[in-house]
Image: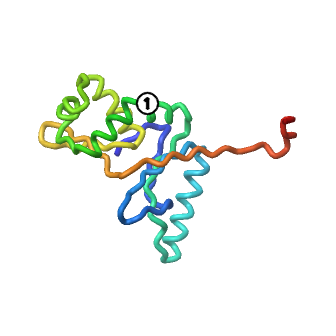
Amino acid sequence: MSQDSNSRTESNATPTTPEKTVLTVRVEPDEGFVDRSLEAMRALDQGEAPEEYHGVSLRDPEELSRLLSAKNVELVRTIAREEPASIRELCRLVDRDIRQVSDDLAELEALGIVELQQNGRAKRPRFEYDEIEIRVPVERDLEREPAPA
């Protein structure tokens, strides 16, 4: 999968069940991504297998809002359910123009959500998960006084 400079794709920490594969999308600074990657490397260095993890880290909350647009969610669901052989077939399934769908797929691919596989002269959109889990940490400034009730 290709990604832009604001998203990173990982494969190593949130457990999934054998029946269900979950893509975890996190909004987090680089440090969270680096910490989880280092933990996985430590486990490997100690001869242990890191926990299975399928995830994408987004630096910017605005990327999350683009991912969660109604049209993008429809595309991901249709790809997962129908497994179209090409972008043109996907366009027919969602009844949308090829330019719009191609632009949305390029964005989803850049975010690390879908993969576009070469299939002859066509590109086949792929989404290999059963669901998407969104994680947005909410940190509190512990030094501030709580607001009055």
In percent of width and height, residue 93 lies at 21, 33
Q: Residue furthest left?
A: 120
Question: Position of 76 compared to 43: left or right?
Answer: left
Residue 17, relative to residue 22: is it above or below?
below
Q: Residue furthest bottom?
A: 47
Q: Nearer the viewer, residue 63 or 68?
A: 68
Q: Nearer the viewer, residue 58 or 17?
A: 17
Residue at x 40% of width, y 30% of height:
70
In percent of width and height, residue 117 lies at 23, 44
Question: Position of 46 compared to 101: left or right?
Answer: right
Q: Nearer the viewer, residue 120 or 24?
A: 24
Does dot 1 land on a helix, a strand or a loop? loop
Q: Mark 1 sits on what residue?
A: 69
Residue 54, relative to residue 83: is it above or below?
below
Q: Residue furthest front?
A: 149
Residue at x 35% of width, y 39% of height:
109
Residue at x 38% of width, y 57% of height:
21
Q: Residue 104 is drawn in which quadrant?
A: top left
Question: Position of 121 compared to 127: left or right?
Answer: left
Question: Position of 124 compared to 39: left or right?
Answer: left
In percent of width and height, residue 86 lies at 18, 37
Task: Identify the image's colour scheme: rainbow, by chain, secondary structure or one colour.
Answer: rainbow
Q: Amino acid at mark 1?
A: Ser
Residue at x 31% of width, y 46% of height:
127
Neighbour class for label 1 at 10 Å: few (<14), some, many (≥20)?
few
